[in-house]
């Protein structure tokens, strides 16, 4: 890459302002007793996120989490169907 191309690339890069992304969390839903995680999160603009545990393909979990034994403590109540991590 020539010196002229580098200077041009640097000038173009500097012309875009750097803005940090941020979101203000305004509320957290009630904790789901069966798994101990919040039922939802809501940001300052009213966007509500719920746990993605249904195995629809968009959740990136292998299968839907199913409550199998309500009398058992977490995670035994899910019989191995609750993922190690999940998205909201």
Image: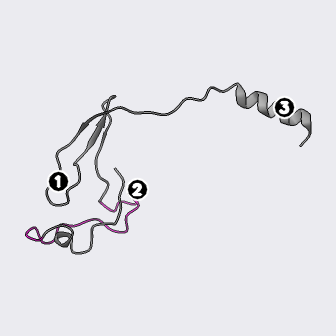
Q: Secondary structure at mark 3?
A: helix
The N terminus: image quadrant:
top right
The earlier-in-sequence mark between 3 and 1 is: 3
Name the residue tied to disc 3: 7
Disc number lying in front (2 or 3): 3
Q: Secondary structure at mark 1?
A: loop
Going by the image, does 77 lie left or right of 82?
left
Picture layout, residue 58 above or below residue 84:
above
Q: Secondary structure at mark 2?
A: loop
Pointer 1: residues within 10 angstroms few (<14), some, or many (20+)? few
Picture layout, residue 36 above or below residue 73:
above
Disc number lying in front (3 or 1): 3
Residue 51 % position (x, y)? 29, 52
| Region in magenta | 54-72
Residue 17 % position (x, y)? 62, 26
Is residue 48 magenta-colored?
Answer: no
**Quarter of image, res 22:** top left
Q: CA distance from mark 3 to mark 1?
A: 55 Å
Name the residue tied to disc 2: 58
């Amino acid at each position: 890459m020539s010196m002229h191309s580098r200077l041009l690339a640097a000038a173009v890069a500097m012309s875009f302002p750097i803005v940090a992304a941020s979101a203000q969390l305004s509320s957290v839903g009630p904790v789901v007793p069966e798994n101990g995680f919040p039922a939802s999160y809501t940001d300052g603009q009213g966007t509500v996120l719920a746990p993605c545990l249904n195995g629809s393909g968009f959740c990136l979990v292998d299968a839907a989490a199913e409550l199998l034994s309500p009398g058992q403590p977490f995670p035994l109540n899910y019989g191995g169907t609750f993922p190690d991590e999940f998205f909201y």
